[in-house]
Image (cartoon, helix red, strand yellow):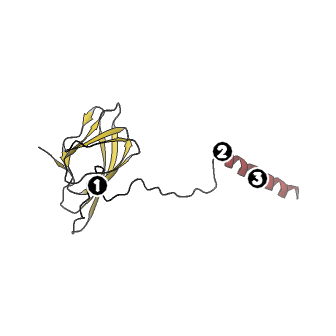
Amino acid sequence: MIKNCLIIALTLLTTFFAHKSGLTTKEVPQSITLIESQVSWNGDSLPNYPMSKPQISILKITIPAHSDLPLHYHPVINAGVLIKGELLVIDEDGNELSLKAGDPIIEVVNKKHLGRNNGEEDAEIIVFYAGSPGMEITKKVQ
C-alpha cells in the first residue's frame, strides 16, 4: 500500500514538474500555412502549370552580406522562405518587397528581378520550383 502511494506521488510530482517546465509526454504535430495565393508578391497572376510531366526542384540559395543576385527571371512558378538574414527583392517595374528571416515569398514568373542583401549577415532562402524536365528554372539577364 505504501509502495503504491509512493509510486503515485512520484508520478504526480514528475507530471507536475514536466508541465511546469514546458515538457509534455506527447508532442502534437502542427501545420501552419505561411503563404497561399494565386498571385506573386507584386500582384501578378501566376501562370498555368506546364502540361508536361512535373519536376519539382528545391534549392537553398545563399546571398552574401552586402551583395546582389544578378538580374534574372524564372519561367516557372516558385515560392520560398527566407530562413536567415534579410533580403530586398526588386522587380523590373520598381516594385520592392523586404523580407526578414521566416518570411515567405511567392516569386514573380517571367518578370526580371533581383535580390539585394543589404544586411550584415548572409541571407539564406529555400526556394521550391514547379517546372518540368528540361525547363530552366532561372535565366540570367545579359
Name the kind of residue labelled 3 in the image. Answer: Leu
* Disc ID at residue 78: 1
The span from disc 2 to disc 1 (Cα, nearest Å) is 41 Å
> Who's the residue at 34% across and 58% down the image?
37
Q: Report if the CB atoms under discs 2 and 1 are less than 8 Å apart.
A: no
SS for dot 2: loop
Marks 2 and 1, the one that precedes in the sequence: 2
| Whole-percent x, y for residue 36 in the image | 37, 57
- Element class at badge 1: strand
Q: Mark 2 points at which residue?
A: 21
Q: Which of marks 3 and 2 is nearer the N terminus?
A: 3
Q: Few, some or many C-alpha atoms within 10 Å of disc 1 (few <14, some 14-19, many ≥20)? A: many
- Disc 2 marks a residue whose amino acid type is Ser
Spot occupied by residue 136 in the image (x, y as percentages of width and height): 19, 55
x and y percent of residue 67 in the render?
Answer: 26, 34
Q: Depth check: give the residue in front, 29 or 50.
A: 50
User: Marks 3 and 2, Cα distance to the nearest angstrom?
Assistant: 14 Å
* Tag 3–tag 2 contact (CB < 8 Å): no
Q: Which amino acid does label 1 sit on?
A: Asn
Tell me: 70 left or right of 120: left
User: Furthest residue to the right?
Assistant: 1
Residue located beneath label 3 in the image: 12
Q: Residue at x 84, y 56 (%)?
A: 5
Q: Position of residue 106 (x, y in %)?
A: 31, 52
Question: Residue 93's quadrant in the figure?
Answer: top left
| Above-or-below relation of 48 to 75 | below
Number of numbered callouts drawn: 3
Q: Residues within 10 Å of mark 3 (few under 14, many from 20)?
A: few
Question: Is the residue 111 above or below the residue 119 in the image?
Answer: below
